[in-house]
Amino acid sequence: MRKKLFCIAMSAVITLSVTVQGNDNILVQNKLMEVNTADKVLESTTFTIDKDTAKKIVNHHNKKSKLTKFEKYKKVITHLGIVSSNNDDEFVKIKKIPEKKSKTVGYVPNEKPVTVIEQISKWYKIKSGKITGYIKQKNVTVDDEVENLLLDNNGIEAKIKVSNVKLRSSKKDTNSAVGMGYKGNTYPVIGFSNDYKNVRIQRTETIAGWVSTKDVDIKILWDSAMTKAEYDAYIEEQKRIQEAELQKILNAGVHKTGDPLFDTISALIAHNESGNYVAARNGLPQFKGEKTITVGAWQWYGERAHNLLRRIYNGDTKKAKQLIKDAVSGSKKIKEEKTEELCKEITDSSSWEKRKRNFSKEELVAIKALLGSNDGVSIQNVQAREDITNRMSVARNTYKLTNPQLIAYFCDMFWQNPENARAITKAAIARFKSAKKLNEEKDGLKVMHEIAMKNSVLGGFSNRRNYTYSVCKKISRK
């Protein structure tokens, strides 16, 4: 009987209808849909099997194989699409029916995932949160590019689920370590190995490494679509936040000048550079280019820091000396010696950067006292205004930038690294064949940002670049 059942299964496609026959056996009626003509098989045949065997067959076909973590992840990715607006708007509209003039039923954040249900002509039917509707096909990326876009936009997170783990410099080298991933902490995913056995996570802007996928839980980040009422409320809130951001100028000590672009750039750089008047530190080891001190609310580095401190000191020499003297320790004679030594360093013209001048903790305390004094705060404000004005002039006169969005983005890049800011701006101009075209095109800022993100230096500060981009997008282009 088993041999006969095997032959039938191998020779044809069979549909089974099962009915109960008696207490011990099940009658199975086989309808032959296709027949291998080489086999002489009856078009229908009846045979019996016991109930236990029938139960095993049913259980076998109903059994769902347990998916691995990344099989589940891949299954989700398969049904996703990433939305993108035409003009780099913050949201993409969801239409009620697949027509351009159709009613807008929702707004999904730009560059975020949605579930793609089906394609209808030049539209995709999608679902996001509680909203189902239609988005133009050209505004939704699907298939192989979805994962890359999620990685580029920090749309995937990894949570360390075991004990603290080493972040490896190589996915293969288990002994290398560039830092630690801490249990319970969540980090952005920036890459997977080809076999998905290892995942690369970004712990900080300068520290990234590989861990085993066994040690993490993976999560795709979603921002559900908003209804029109939710969207309107969000826009009002964003206007309030933007006004609050501009008010940070007052907190940073730079009073509004009446020039909206200048004031926005001042607030932007103050935000990015911490806005702390009494900040003073030696070069950080993770930043190879830092050889000496960084100071102030706008984080002046090297000789810029040196020049600022010299300017504060010369503003009131007697007061500056007393602040330094009060900050150092020791006997009266030792305090005098330390004070004279630091005053000489500040007024000297030798380059701190070339000498790789490192300051002691006590010296840093004295420098902070200078920076936090009334003169220190006032001169930092003046220096910031002069420096920002100079950078705006470079943007306008050297690179012929007239688009306020581009000028603001350039100034922040230039503040951080002049050499790379120049290279990025030249590349953006070359992309559009002229500065005039770069200023006029709607996606000029987007292109400059994309080039900056790929830069080996500025691209390493992705949080700063993305924040700057988000602020510059809101600046009027006129």
Image: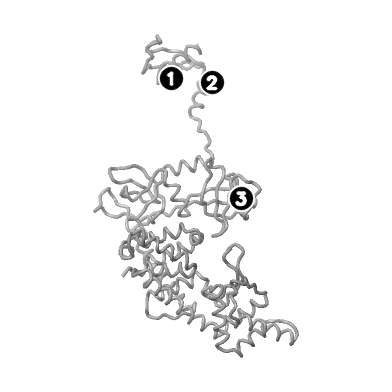
Q: Can you tell which mark lies on residue 39? A: none
- The mark that comes first in sequence, 2 or 1, is 1
Amino acid on which the number 1 mark rests in the picture: Thr
Tell me residue 27's x, y (percent).
Answer: 45, 16
Element on which disc 2 rests: helix
Residue bearing mark 3: 168
Element under disc 1: strand
Q: Nearer the viewer, mark 1 or mark 3?
A: 3
Numbered label tally: 3
Find residue 213 and report its horizontal and vertical position in percent: 57, 45
Tell me what residue is drawn at x 46 percent, y 57 percent.
Answer: 454
Q: Amino acid at mark 2?
A: Asp
In front of the other: 199 or 12: 199
Q: Quadrant of residue 15?
A: top left
Residue farthest toward the bottom in the current orientation of the protein: 318
258 or 247, which is in the foreground? 258
Label located before the other in sequence (1 or 3): 1
Mark 1 highlights which residue? 19
Q: Mark 3 falls on what kind of element?
A: loop
- Please identify the residue farthest to the top as the structure is shown: 40
- What residue is drawn where x is 60% and y is 47%? 215
Image coordinates of residue 450 in percent, x first then y, are 42, 58
The residues tagged by marks 1 and 3 sit, at their Cα atoms, a distance apart of: 60 Å
Q: Is residue 298 above or below residue 460?
A: below
Identify the residue under disc 2: 52
10 Å crowding of disc 2: few (<14), some (14-19), many (20+): few
Q: Label 1 crowding class (10 Å Cα cut-off): few <14, some 14-19, many 20+? A: few
